[in-house]
């Protein structure tokens, strides 16, 4: 039993048909528990007041926005090296989910920043690099949409994803150099001495788990749709040939 | 490779379009800026390095789709792909030709346009240096974008969507060098970063662009 067995679309479809409802249910449960716990059963921060509660949406969404790109990078590499079609389709399926996560992070950040920083938007390194990440997602999706032949599209977007990853990291360091930060530092690192207080920490962990599960469920669902679309296309071609 | 370089340059200069058009576009962008932000010389002097960089970048973008599109249409790209010269070399030669016909003239024209924007006297040398160090990266990244979109009918708009985010690091460090030069600050770090990005781009992107071309020629 190895992960590569799921390169077979039939095997992939059979397994995910059972996995998607379970994952989706778990995601809904985690999100419900995490968000309700976070919004209604945690104290208000002594300086930020109730606005602190946006952390339960903002942090997990930002985390998944970056991880979605990483997942696309890995999937693109698998496609370019081992030519598994499911992998290419998974990368394609992940992009819209990732771009939504990026938008959620940007939007919740703006909503929080207005009362706290007194501005919707600041050209802070983190904010700026997220905006650039958003542009990378847009370009990636536009390239998928523009090319008709699926294998060509998978190859070219794969190459773009590799090059884009390098430039995304470069841009991250470039904007760090370019402007001073307003955004607070990392508050969830495993190696940091001082993290966010426990009372906020546990619901946040549950919310993050919910977002991860939601991402996985959505990507699997979308990959299934892509595989079905591909089958439909093949059937149509066969019908026309007959 | 030299032959290909000379051929591409001759085509770019003689076949109308690319060569003069980019420069004219650069001029117009710079002339339009004072109309948009007002004619105060202090404001113009402050934004001059950034505006010149942005203008050069957009002017460079204009001629990108010509790098491969014409050769793609008449089939000479297929011939080049089967030639003994590796495709990576073809890409490098074409990017170099693009730089010589676009980046270099833009670099040389920038100080002249700096006069319009009241660029401080100390800034000219650094602006020239920064553009000379940064525009090769713009051409090479652009060649990669052009290789990705060569097979598409309406690739032009998509090309700018793909290429502009990739220009961010070059733009940041290039404009930073020019700004610090104009204000007389220390600029060794951004200049080193700018040079590093250009060198890395020139070394690695020909392989990515050649891979994209091979997919498109399949």
Image (cartoon, coloured by chain):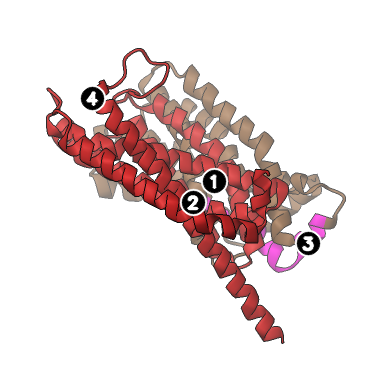
Chain colours: A red, B brown
What secondary structure is marked by label 1?
helix
- In this view, the residue in front, B157 or A234, is A234
**Measuring 53% from the left and 25% from the top, which residue is drawn there?**
B193
Residue under label 1, please give it: A72
Using a 10 Å C-alpha cutoff, classify the residue at mark 3 as few (fewer than 14 neighbours), some (14 to 19) or many (20 or more).
some
> For mark 4, what is the residue?
A199
* Residue B66 picture location, percent across and down: 61, 58
* Contact check, label 1 and label 4, Cβ < 8 Å: no
> Which of the pair A241/B25 is nearer the observer?
A241
Q: Are both tags, 4 and 2, on one chain? A: yes
Q: Earlier in the sequence, mark 1 or mark 4?
A: 1
- Residue ID for mark 3: B78
> Could you confirm whether marks 1 and 4 are on the same chain?
yes
Pointer 3 with pointer 4, Cβ within 8 A: no
> Between tags 3 and 4, which lies in front?
4
**Quick check: can you spot residue B116?**
no
Q: Is residue A13 magenta?
A: no
Q: Is residue A38 left or right of residue A104?
A: left
């Amino acid at each position: 039993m190895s992960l590569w067995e799921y390169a077979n679309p039939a095997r992939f479809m059979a397994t995910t048909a059972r996995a998607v409802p379970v994952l989706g249910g778990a995601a809904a449960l985690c999100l419900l528990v995490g968000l309700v716990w976070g919004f209604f059963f945690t104290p208000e921060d002594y300086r930020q007041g109730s606005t602190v509660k946006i952390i339960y949406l903002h942090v997990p969404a930002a985390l998944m926005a970056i991880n979605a790109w990483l997942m696309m990078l890995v999937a693109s590499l698998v496609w370019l090296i081992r030519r598994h079609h499911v992998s290419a389709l998974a990368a394609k399926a992940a992009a819209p989910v990732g771009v939504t996560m990026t938008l959620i992070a940007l939007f919740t950040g703006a909503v929080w920043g207005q009362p706290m920083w007194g501005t919707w938007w600041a050209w802070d390194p983190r904010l700026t690099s997220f905006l650039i990440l958003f542009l990378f997602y847009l370009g990636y999706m536009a390239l998928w949409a523009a090319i008709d032949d699926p294998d060509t599209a998978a190859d070219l977007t794969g190459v773009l994803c590799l090059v884009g990853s390098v430039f995304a990291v470069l841009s991250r360091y470039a904007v760090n150099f370019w402007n001073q930060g307003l955004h607070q530092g990392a508050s969830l690192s495993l190696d940091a001495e001082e993290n966010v207080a426990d009372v906020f920490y546990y619901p946040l962990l549950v919310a993050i788990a919910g977002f991860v599960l939601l991402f996985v469920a959505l990507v699997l669902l979308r990959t299934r749709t892509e595989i079905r679309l591909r089958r439909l296309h093949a059937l149509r071609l066969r019908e026309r040939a007959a | 490779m030299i032959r290909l370089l000379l051929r591409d340059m001759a085509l770019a200069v003689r076949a109308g379009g690319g060569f003069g058009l980019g420069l004219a576009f650069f001029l117009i962008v710079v002339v339009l800026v004072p109309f948009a932000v007002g004619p105060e010389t202090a404001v113009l002097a402050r934004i001059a390095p950034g505006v010149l960089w942005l203008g050069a970048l957009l002017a460079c973008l204009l001629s990108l789709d010509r790098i491969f599109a014409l050769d793609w249409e008449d089939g000479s790209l297929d011939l080049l792909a089967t030639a003994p010269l590796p495709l990576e070399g073809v890409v490098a030669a074409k990017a170099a030709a693009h730089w010589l016909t676009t980046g270099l003239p833009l670099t040389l024209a920038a100080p002249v346009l700096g006069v319009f924007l009241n660029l401080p006297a100390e800034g000219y040398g650094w602006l020239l240096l920064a553009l000379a160090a940064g525009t090769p990266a713009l051409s090479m990244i652009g060649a990669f974008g052009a290789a990705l979109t060569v097979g598409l009918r309406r690739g032009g708009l998509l090309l700018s969507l793909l290429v502009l985010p990739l220009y961010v690091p070059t733009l940041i460090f290039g404009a930073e060098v020019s700004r610090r030069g104009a204000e007389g600050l220390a600029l060794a770090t951004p200049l080193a970063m700018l040079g590093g990005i250009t060198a890395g781009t020139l070394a690695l992107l020909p392989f990515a662009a050649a891979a994209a071309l091979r997919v498109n020629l399949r």
